[in-house]
């Protein structure tokens, strides 16, 4: 059974940078589209970025384009989200999710918390 | 990037039937189909249905999804206390080349 485990969430100052990681196991990681989704406190789900299995195609939410970069290392079964120029409104739980069987987000991690505050 | 439209809240009685809706357009729900996710407080989302009316193994038959035009629906029969949760729809938007979510519907089981 597939599993996703996020890490890297932390308290960061406005304008700072952070790299989130997501360790994947139990499925054919390199074959799957992977995505980062976030959820601000008390708010709904917000899609951020998606990357193809071979890493050659990426899509971003307009408001994070240029600040966030999604990447993956298939040799390590790992997904990453590099975030820079962080703002207070970027504070959220960040989830890693994958389309492991279906053309939908069928596997989710537990999330990692990012706090942006001085 | 515009999202999908869901009613903020729905309340139904125990053992009743709830139908949640999700409205998009021809660029997303209409031609790409929709998926439904359930999220209990403090937990990650869980996939309930995909491509409009398909249910992953392990999901109760009480949950059924459908689509008509640009609107997707999730019907939950025989409501149980554990069905009280937030429900989100999602779809790929071919025009935006982005995934879009609905704002979520909070289901209360009375």
Image (spheres, rainbow, N blue to C red):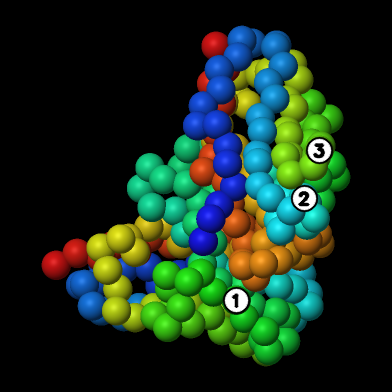
Give the letter of the chain under mark 3: B
User: Circle 1 sits on which residue?
Assistant: A59
Q: Is residue B75 visible?
A: yes
Q: Quadrant of residue A19?
A: bottom left
What percent of the width, then of the height, locates residue A47? 54, 61
**Quadrant in which the N terminus of chain A is drawn:** bottom right
Q: Residue at x 56, y 22 (%)?
A: B10
- Find residue B68 and report its horizontal and vertical position in percent: 81, 38
Residue receiving disc 3: B68
Residue sitting nearer the eye, A100 or B34: B34
Q: Describe the element under mark 2 as helix, strand or loop.
A: helix
Distance of label 2 from label 3 (alpha carbons): 8 Å
Residue found 62% across the figure and 81% down from its top: A58
Q: Earlier in the sequence, mark 2 or mark 3?
A: 2
Residue placed at 48% from the left, 71% from the top? A62
- Front label number (2 vs 1): 2
Badge 3: how crowded within 10 Å, few (<14), some, or many (20+)? few
| Residue on which the image places disc 2 | B30
What whole-number distance in Å separates the C-alpha atoms at marks 2 and 1? 21 Å
Q: Position of residue B73 (x, y in %)?
A: 73, 34
Q: Do we see residue B45 in this rendering?
A: no
Q: Name the secondary structure under disc 3.
A: strand
Chain on which label 2 sits: B
Question: Which chain letter matches label 1?
Answer: A
Quadrant assignment, res B71: top right
Disc 1: CA contacts within 10 A as few (<14), some (14-19) or many (>=20) = some
């Amino acid at each position: 059974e597939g599993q996703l485990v996020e890490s890297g969430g932390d308290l960061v100052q406005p304008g700072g940078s952070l790299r989130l990681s997501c360790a994947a196991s139990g499925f054919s990681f390199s074959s799957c589209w992977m995505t980062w989704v976030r959820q601000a406190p008390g708010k709904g789900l917000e899609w951020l970025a998606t990357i193809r299995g071979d890493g050659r195609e990426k899509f971003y939410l307009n408001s994070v384009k240029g600040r966030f970069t999604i990447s993956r290392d298939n040799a390590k079964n790992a997904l990453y989200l590099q975030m820079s120029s962080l703002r207070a409104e970027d504070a959220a739980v960040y989830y890693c999710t994958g389309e492991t069987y279906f053309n939908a987000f069928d596997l989710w991690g537990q999330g990692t918390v990012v706090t942006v505050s001085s | 990037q515009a999202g999908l439209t869901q009613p903020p809240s729905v309340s139904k009685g125990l053992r009743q039937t709830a139908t949640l809706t999700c409205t998009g357009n021809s660029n997303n729900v209409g031609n790409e189909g929709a998926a439904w996710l359930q999220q209990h407080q403090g937990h990650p989302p869980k996939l309930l249905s995909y491509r409009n009316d398909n249910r992953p193994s392990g999901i109760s038959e009480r949950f059924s999804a459908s689509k008509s035009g640009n609107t997707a629906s999730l019907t939950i029969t025989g409501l149980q206390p554990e069905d009280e949760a937030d429900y989100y729809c999602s779809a790929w938007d071919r025009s935006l080349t982005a995934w879009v979510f609905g704002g979520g519907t909070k289901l209360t089981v009375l």
